[in-house]
Image: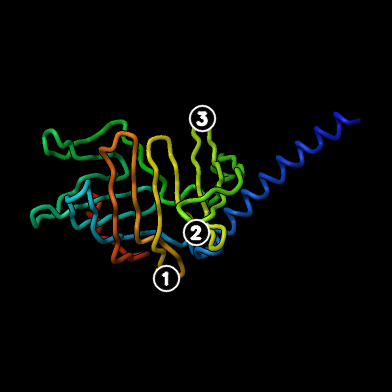
Amino acid sequence: MKKLLIVLVLIFSQLSFAQTAKEIIDKNIELSGGLTSWKLLNSVLLQGKVILGIKDEYPIKIYQQRPNLTKTVLTINGKETAIEGYDGNKGYAMNYATNKLQVYADYIPESFDNDFIDWENKGFEAKYLGKEKVGEIYCHKVELTKNVNKNFYYFDTKTYMLLKEIKREETLSYSDYKKVGNLLMPFRIESSSTKKDGDFVMLLNKVEINKVFPANIFKF
């Protein structure tokens, strides 16, 4: 009887953790604009500046469009230069050794939607890992797992906005949330990695949504 009770407690505990993780994700989606608004989002243009290292600073534009089209453009010495993107068939990235844009056969485009939108239908499993501080802010920590990949997400316990995301090779921090249409989006994004070669701080000053891009904008 005692063993049965322990098993039941463990099962209930796992179920409540899964439910809590779902509730946190649902709350994030709801308070950041709602599922309908996120699904009606078809394109985004991010504009601002990116700081690489300590002193290197460049104006940046990032074009994104469903289902996975993307193009990142830096202004270097007064000239706009595409440094990375996906045109629907091929992925491109700047080879800094040759200072030329080249095709990468193993380029994997990211989904236009974040992992939280329809996460269950995408095959993710969610687990609540309790509360943890990010700086001075208490956050709900949620793990999303798909196959062998595990990502960790930290949501502000008061606002439910995403403050930190830990991937296998990269940690992203989000802050300075502002309303864009019906959606709340971060205007400051910091990235750090163990390799340190891709660290950056991106400060946005303008975000446009559902903008109709020229037909050739994703050409390289």
Residue type at mark 1: give it.
Gly
Q: Which residue is labeled 2 in the image? A: 161
Residue type at mark 3: give it.
Val
Question: For the residue labelled by badge 3, is the local secondary structure a helix, a strand or a loop?
Answer: loop
Q: Is residue 178 left or right of residue 19?
A: left
Residue 35 in sight in this render: no
Q: Is residue 121 left or right of residue 149?
A: right
| Earlier-in-chain disc, 3 versus 1 | 3
Front-most of 174 and 207? 174
Which residue is the extreme one toward the right? 1
Q: Is residue 102 left or right of residue 5?
A: left
Front-most of 117 and 86? 117
C-alpha gap between disc 2 and disc 3: 26 Å
| Earlier-in-chain disc, 1 versus 2 | 2
Q: Is residue 160 left or right of residue 82?
A: right
C-alpha gap between disc 3 and disc 1: 36 Å
Q: Position of residue 102 (x, y in %)?
A: 19, 36
Q: Position of residue 73 (x, y in %)?
A: 21, 52
- Compared to 6, does 138 lie above or below? below
Numbered tag placed on residue 148 in the rendering: 3
Front-most of 178 and 139? 139
At 58% from the left edge and 49% from the top edge, which residue is drawn? 131
For disc 1, the neighbor class at 10 Å (few under 14, some 14 to 19, many from 20) is: few
| Earlier-in-chain disc, 2 versus 3 | 3
At 45% from the left edge and 66% from the top edge, which residue is drawn? 183
Q: Which residue is labeled 1 in the image? A: 181
At 60% from the left edge and 54% from the top edge, which residue is drawn? 24
